[in-house]
Image (cartoon, grey):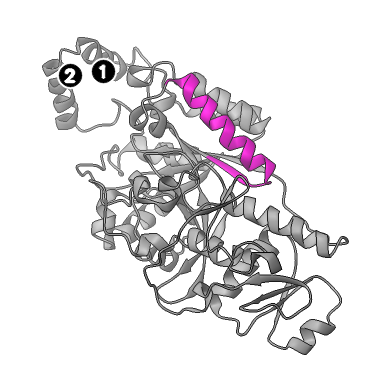
Amino acid sequence: MLLIYTSSVPDRLRYIARLLFEEISGLSVTFTQSEEAFRSFEGPKLAYSKEPPGEGMFMEASGLLFEQEIFPHDIPVHRYGDLPILFESSKAAEGFPFDLLAASFYLVTRYEEYLATRYDQFGRFPASSSLAFLCGFLDQPVVNCWLKLFLDRLRDYYPALMTRQEPYRYLPTIDIDHAYAYRYRPFHRTLGGVVRSLSHGRISEVLERFRVLGGLSHDPFDTYSFFRELHEQHQLSTHCFVLFADYGRNDNNIPVNSKGMQDLIRSLGQWSEIGVHPSLSSSKHPSLLQKEIEGLEAAAGKGITCSRQHFLKFSFPSTFRRLAELGIRDDYSMGYASHPGFRAGIAHPFRFFDLKHNIESDLRIHPIPVMDVTFRDYLRLTPGESMEQIKQIIRQIRFYNGQFISLWHNESLSDSGRWKGWRWLYEEVVKEAAG
């Protein structure tokens, strides 16, 4: 057990202490506001206060966790050895060098995104505006780094300290934005596709479309058997997130009521976990989200409890409140489309904390450090260059016994068109992550 002495126990402090010490480290946490009880306690203890009480390990409390509102904070990033730190202590010589709890809370809750004023063309908070990107630590799970530093220091005080961590885990996830390239599309969309291909001089696309529709060729986006067999070979479970929405400018899967979509969902449900992929339209019209979830549940014949936002488009706290209200228990959207890395600074899942109300939710958020589109379309890297970056991320997550989640699309596994040569990358990612 870890006893924490503090002047009060607000919900913010209770939340981050439980995440770091109980959920990740396997320690039970108890709080006390009594100096006498703290001094007399003989086990591992931490004083989280403005002044050290004279015994146990001391961490200077910066004050963030005792606030009730959301305020702009000027947060300089300092260095402690090779590690970036936030909320540096003015009493580092007397205890821990920075406020681990406030720093972790600031990143995990995405505090800065509640105060954001700049967005990209899809209304997303850009990675380039984040503290982690601007200060060069987006590629590090710094919360995990900080926690290890703290536990090592705590063992200096209490050599018998025992912690327990879950083993490293890998979960491959697939987004299905376009279930098929050519099949099951309405005639007017097929005709429009033919016209677009001809107008750009892509005669081979027109011929491929007619071969697929004539039953002479395999639809290039029908990669389901490929990744199913690959995942089973490495004894991995699979999560598939299906865009189950009416046609829109950025939501253009095959029709939800088509035989192809209904058959596909029933098939996927036999060997994978199915999640909803809320449309971009639903971010503007929240009532659509319930319709999409209910429609997907009807097609799958079972409840839907996990989700990932289309285009990774979400807003704090409205998106996550709405998901929780509709029965979603796990969300897999916490990543940037434009850059790989750790948007929340952590390599473990965590419960959503609503900063507006200072309430911890039952909704669990799973960070997504890598996505196929990031490397090809945003960073314009080759598959080989992409693999080097992904390896570094996997190694860090494995070192901290975290959860590595890859985000790929069924179409990027087609090994055709703009994704020619990229199937190899996914095979290497799975091999590295599962090995």
Horizontal side of 11 relative to 435 (left or right) equals left
Judging depth in this view, the residue of 113 and 409 nearest the camera is 113
Answer yes or no: is residue 335 visible: no
Eye-nearest disc, 1 or 2: 2
**What is the quadrant of the N terminus in the image?**
bottom right
Q: Pointers 1 and 2 in contact (CB under 8 A)?
A: yes
Which residue is pictured at 69% across the width and 41% down the height? 399
Position of residue 357 relative to residue 170, above or below, is below
Circle 2 sits in a helix, a strand or a loop, which is it?
helix
Magenta residue check for 272: no
Judging depth in this view, the residue of 136 and 176 nearest the camera is 136
Position of residue 289 relative to residue 32, above or below, is above
The disc label shown at residue 209, or none: 1
Q: Which of the 4 image quarters holds residue 242?
A: top left
The disc label shown at residue 273, or none: none
- Magenta stretch in the rendered image: 382-405
Label 2 Cα neighbours within 10 Å, binned few <14 / some 14-19 / many ≥20: some
Horizontal side of 243 relative to 160 (left or right) equals left
Magenta residue check for 393: yes
Which residue is pictured at 38% across the width and 57% down the height? 294
Name the amino acid, label 1: Arg
Circle 1 sits in a helix, a strand or a loop, which is it?
helix
Mark 2 or mark 1, which is nearer the start of the sequence? Answer: 2
Q: List x then y, in percent, for residue 65.
A: 52, 74
The residue identified by callout 2 is: 197
Distance between the alpha carbons at the discs numbered 1 and 2: 10 Å
**What is the quadrant of the C terminus in the image?**
top right
Judging depth in this view, the residue of 77 and 6 nearest the camera is 77
